[in-house]
Image (cartoon, grey):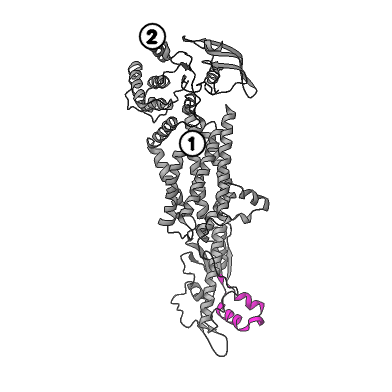
Amino acid sequence: MHDDYAVFVDRVVKRYGQKEVLTGICMKVERGIIYGLLGASGCGKTTLLSSIVGRKKTDGGEIWVLGGKPGEVGSGVPGPRVGYMPQDIALVGEFTVKDAIYYFGRIFSMEDSLIAKRYRNLHTLLELPPDDRYLKNCSGGQQRRVSLAASLVHKPELLIMDEPTTSVATSVSTFEIGHGSTDILAKKKILKARNALNKSRMKALLDKNLKQFYRNITGIIFLMTFPILQVGVFMGAVGGDIRNIPLGIVNDEAMSVTCPGFSFNGTATATDDRACQLRNISCRFLSYLDHPMIDKVHFETLEDAKDAVLHGKIVGAMYMSSNFTSFLEERIDKGKDIEKDILSLSEIKVWMDMSNRQIGATLKYKLIDLYTKFQNSLFDDCDFVPGFGDLPVNINFIYGDGDEPYTVFMIPGSLITIMFFMGAIMTSQIIITDRHDGVWDRSIVAGVTSLEITITHLVLQASICIIQTAELLIVVYLIYQQEYLGSLWLMYLMVYLQGICGMAYGFWVSVISTDHSMANTVLTGIFLPMMMLSGLMWPTEGMPPALRIFSRCLPFTMAIESLRNVSKRGWSLDNFQVYSGMGVGFMWTVFFGVLSVYLIKKKR
């Protein structure tokens, strides 16, 4: 009985959550007729048509199309037996008119020569726009006619149109009268099962993705320059030497606050009767503050200097008492027998503004470093044993350098983070665009599988990732000449694989998101927590134990550590702390991929 009808719908039920959209609907469409499905807006017409073409699964009842159930092996639905013209245009704006027809012809595994013949016939019959006109530049009516031609190019047995315009409906009637009903009406035909991956469909999809990419100049500029811009801004703005920190100076010992005519000669002299004879030592120390980091601001009184700190005009106030030189000389001579008052007066006192900890701490440690150099110089002039003024802790470096800027610590994390989120942004935006424009659904009705669409998108974007990864490493290690000890190719592979992981994450975001706004919210919402927890800005050793364990399970926390081990320690893949980071990223890639496929199937 089902074979006698083009479409046979028997007591179909469809629910969205608790809302029942289709309630026991029945419909019979005979072969060889034009059937009109009428109903108010929102009554479920599109849902019913989507179920007929196999895009949605029903919650009850049966649907038979051309003698088979949609989605069953050999039914040809979704596939070449049905031509589907959705309510929206559902075509790629970067396609020309000719590209659109050829794309769907190749989806149906047609030879190019046959597509060309069908295209010429349809072009004349439907009065299509010029071959090379981009669809985004066509009028609404022209786009609808191209959409109709795309659904007719393979001569389907059944043509389904969702809310066609009057002009399109007229074109269909003309097509039927002029060319016979066999082109658009039902005939029984059993097809072989679709291959899981079809070479012709994959080729058509890759061609579509490539044209979408290279015909979008703004997108190309963004994808190719944004990684360079990001890493360039990072290298230029983070970790550089801080300069011109205003430091207030109050020197009660000097006749003038600026020590005019000061000379090193004779400020420290070794003598027989005492450890060292000192003169004008406060000015000698101030000469060590002639450093790019420090901008000396002289004050007459300590109260004025402290007031400037309170009002944010300077970062610190330094004070040296009158007779500072004699008190320091006595401190050196008497050692453990010195009085507390003399000890206090021989100190250089500093009041700091630590509201900006990075600035305050940087100035603090620089002053300590400069005083150590001043002290060693002083002891050298006084004939002390070389190194007497050093701290009694001798630190040697096996990896790294004690004077490395903070940038060196952040480079691995920045490379991994940039590549991960670039991959996520690319995938989520492109796939959501396909779904929003209807291209995804229309392609699937034509017989394309979700797996084929996903693979072809990932192939193109993985190719783009190759270029973006190279750009990042070129900027960091060739242009900025950052040192690395391990294999550059291994470092490249690690960063690239994080881009692939980001693409899998972006694919998952595109599946759970209804539009671009939601996808952007998910991407930006996860960015800061991931950055904070990954050890990019601060070592994970500073976290509470439970949070540290959680952070190490995230996609790129261990990947950052692995990349740092390769670049700064020269380790290779035979070390667990290198391949473990790659392994965690790989597991997240598989997880996002499997979860996305599951959600796609569940949404049907």
Q: Looking at the image, is 486 positioned above or below residue 434?
A: below
* Observer-nearest of 128 and 327: 128
Q: Point out residue 374 in the picture as x, y percentages from the top left corner.
A: 52, 75
**Which element type, helix, strand or loop, lies under badge 1?**
helix
The overriding secondary structure of the stretch rendered in magenta is helix
Q: Name the amino acid, label 2.
A: Ile
Q: Point out residue 379 in the picture as x, y percentages from the top left corner.
A: 54, 80
- What is the quadrant of residue 16 in the picture? top right
Q: Which mark identifies residue 177? A: 2
Asked if the stretch drawn in magenta spans residue 30, the answer is no
- What is the quadrant of residue 166 in the picture? top left
Q: Which mark identifies residue 148? A: none
Q: Point out residue 572 in the picture as x, y percentages from the top left corner.
A: 52, 57
Q: Which mark identifies residue 455? A: 1
* Observer-nearest of 292 and 585: 585
Q: Earlier in the sequence, mark 2 or mark 1?
A: 2
